[in-house]
Image (tube, coloured by chain):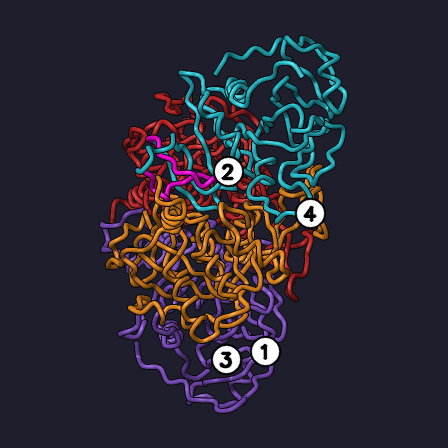
Chain colours: A red, B orange, C purple, D cyan
Amino acid sequence: MNKITPSIEDAIAGIEDGMTVMIGGFGGSGAPIELIDALVARYKATGSPGRLTVINNNAGNGAIGIAAMIYAGMVAKIICSFPRSTDSRAFTERYHAGEIELELVPQGTLAERIRAGGAGIPAFYTPTSFGTDIAKGKPVAEFDGRLYVQERWLKADVAIIKAELADRKGNLTYNKAARNFAPLMAMAAATTIVQARQVVEPGGIDPEHVVTPGIFVDTIVEIADAKQEEALLREAALLQDGGTA
Amino acid sequence: MNKITPSIEDAIAGIEDGMTVMIGGFGGSGAPIELIDALVARYKATGSPGRLTVINNNAGNGAIGIAAMIYAGMVAKIICSFPRSTDSRAFTERYHAGEIELELVPQGTLAERIRAGGAGIPAFYTPTSFGTDIAKGKPVAEFDGRLYVQERWLKADVAIIKAELADRKGNLTYNKAARNFAPLMAMAAATTIVQARQVVEPGGIDPEHVVTPGIFVDTIVEIADAKQEEALLREAALLQDGGTA
Amino acid sequence: MKAKLTNAQIAWRAAQDIPDGAYVNLGIGFPEMVAKFKPKGREVIYHTENGVLDFGEAPPAGEEDWDLINAGKKAVTLNAGASFFNHADSFAMVRGGHLDVAILGAYEVAENGDLANWSTGPKSVPAVGGAMDLVHGAKRVCVITDHVTKDGKPKLVERCSLPLTGVGCVTTVYTSLAVVEIIDKRFVLREKLPSISMEELQAVTGAKLVVEGACKDLNVPEV
Amino acid sequence: MKAKLTNAQIAWRAAQDIPDGAYVNLGIGFPEMVAKFKPKGREVIYHTENGVLDFGEAPPAGEEDWDLINAGKKAVTLNAGASFFNHADSFAMVRGGHLDVAILGAYEVAENGDLANWSTGPKSVPAVGGAMDLVHGAKRVCVITDHVTKDGKPKLVERCSLPLTGVGCVTTVYTSLAVVEIIDKRFVLREKLPSISMEELQAVTGAKLVVEGACKDLNVPEV
């Protein structure tokens, strides 16, 4: 069993037109920029994979990461909780032009729907969004005198996530708050593709400290010096401001 | 904020007659024997806390732990997945005498119901037990052409669990497979009482390695040389066999 | 309008009611200011939706770790005893009722406890984030807000006109003029600025203010 | 009855169909024996309900760590690359369909894939454990069993008479006489002992055995 591949192009080769792709990260923290870059490059070179449904907390910022996917025209739909950011022009323009579909999901419901997808729970009830526009059309049920909204699981064809350590069996750790949605997405996707800062030998991660057990992971590519989306965005903003800090 | 108490008697002082008590452990692995011993001693001395509902994977083995609670007469009901064990006489006798109630729950459903209790999810659907006697009387719904059973959350007044490391803010780690139900029970109980092998300073557990964040924990007592239920049972069995190994 | 509290003073007042040992989520933006005014000697544990418990102050400029941020995507630091967890576990803390206090901003709060704070209507790109979870996530759900909108309309109303964030969820409102609790679908006035009369306060409030027991003076230092 | 496979031989046969790199849960008791017969050169990752992935063989007597056990409460060891997780995550692996193979015992298996393996009726204390989750948890749900009960009654039946563990869940049955797949609610015979005739096999089977394509000889070494 060896889930490591040396080539980032090979890692993403199975992602096809029309797929649903979960992308790890909360804003720039945990965004798998190199995997996204490779996807965008492939789309620009070959016209595929297009018409993607992207699941992420946000809808891109600036011109890198998910925003670059949107600018490239690869994204048909976004399922997210917060499509606004400092510079969410990419999404906003396409959304107002009617060129991209939005399914807005409260953040905790988004997380729980993804976990449910990974855990074989087709639906659950939550107090979140009851009585709001978000709940329109969804079944409602009463438990112990209180009303709850029924939500469905979310699954994906592929998850692309960023990890800290990985071994060939697929065990993962993350870096600080970059963990966020990644462990859930790894569970909920048919295929999980990981860019890890460092590949270690099996046993190199203490069994007590494994965050994502290898059963949820399919392909790993080592990217030692990965870009940090937020840091890049801030550098870009500084340059735009004429270099004043 | 200091959740440490030096006295095991103080730690369990708030447990009252008729309460629902989640008890960590899978068989002997993770069983909080010293907390249970203190509860049994209090019951024998004062007649309280009695009429308890106990939630655990099992229903006791031999004459210690949950079996000792049953022998003492403190337990009115057990919610568990597997009340049989090598020597589950305590439960079996009371059950056949009609003196103890049993709610049998498939193991994965038990775990998920407890998690749901902790996560504010009042109900969820699972394929587990569909079409079986266990599902009788429970709502059924179809999702994507498949039938599922609706299950309700499980909450408790108190959880008593065993941890490896703890700090005064309530952060916990566990020892190997002794983790099992404990992190879920800590979430689902109004009050969570922990016996930890060692208390460390805050920061003594790496933030990446915390398994149960302190928000789920109320009271901690340090028990450095805790008994291991399974080891004790095996010693007792050897003695009964006349000391032959 | 006569004197009113600054945002910092509203945040200060809200901070006084956070007890020692509380687990607290501060919403993005204005509510984050509450952390500055934690009374000395109290230990408060802050939760952020993106999976950190017990984070500390912002790091000095230039020392940010952008993998260590809060829900507002601002860099933070860690206190000793912090922990990381995934997003589902984070919202289990929220939805499961494990937080003691959540402090949020508002466009409108209704006397029945309804809150509108996520959408000003269908024109802009909708974005809800964690707000709809947080309003069901804490034992006390507090709102901090100016008492009126920029063009002088009441923010405390009989019924919200904007899209709701949650139904019957708000317990306490700290405004630039008053402290109001929501009890049995009524605005119960607990404190008001001494410089404003009951009639003046009622005139800028969109629903009836009930006085039950003492209505204290809202005294806040310069901060 | 003529020659039949021993339990060890049934376990051996089931083990041959576990592919390299598979994630596998072996039920308590007889199914645990399958691990012994993993073909050389294949890497198989074992899952146990109580929160361990990639555990290894039993430790030598006297070296047990009773906090490191499997679902059968037997002491195990760890392979390099093992991990621990809580019970909800463990059953997320099961229920979420992440296992490749689950191997279970049976009282009865029906041609429609129904399985009865948890209760012999209302007399004894009922105990279900993880069986009802496991039957919905793997891409292949395999049963290993003697072909008939101790008193010679068929265990492969048209409809189960004992309380069900799961509906339509079994994909493959390895018995002491045959290998049977369940396809479209029929028992499709894949292999049978060469020493037993089709008529003899059908006579000890409680539902129709369908032959579709080749029925191979079930050849198992002495183990």
Nearest to N terminus: mark 1 or mark 3: 3
Q: Position of residue A243 (x, y in %)?
A: 25, 45
Q: Nearer the viewer, mark 1 or mark 2?
A: 2
- C2 relative position to D148: left or right: left
> Disc 1: which chain?
C
Residue topped by disc 2: D93
First reached walking from the N terminus: tag 4 or tag 2: 2
Co-location on one chain, circles 4 and 3: no
Q: Are marks 4 and 2 on the same chain?
A: yes
Give the residue type at disc 4: Pro
Label 2: how many residues lie within 10 Å, few (<14), some (14-19) or many (20+)?
many
Q: Which mark is residue C206?
A: 1
Of B146 and C16, nearer the camera is B146
Mark 4 secondary-structure assignment: loop
Question: Up-down: is C145 above or below A201?
Answer: below
Quarter of image, res A101: top right
| Image mark for residue D142 | none
- Specify start and end residues of the magenta stretch as a single range: D63-80
Residue to which mark 4 is pinned:
D122
Kind of residue at disc 2: Met
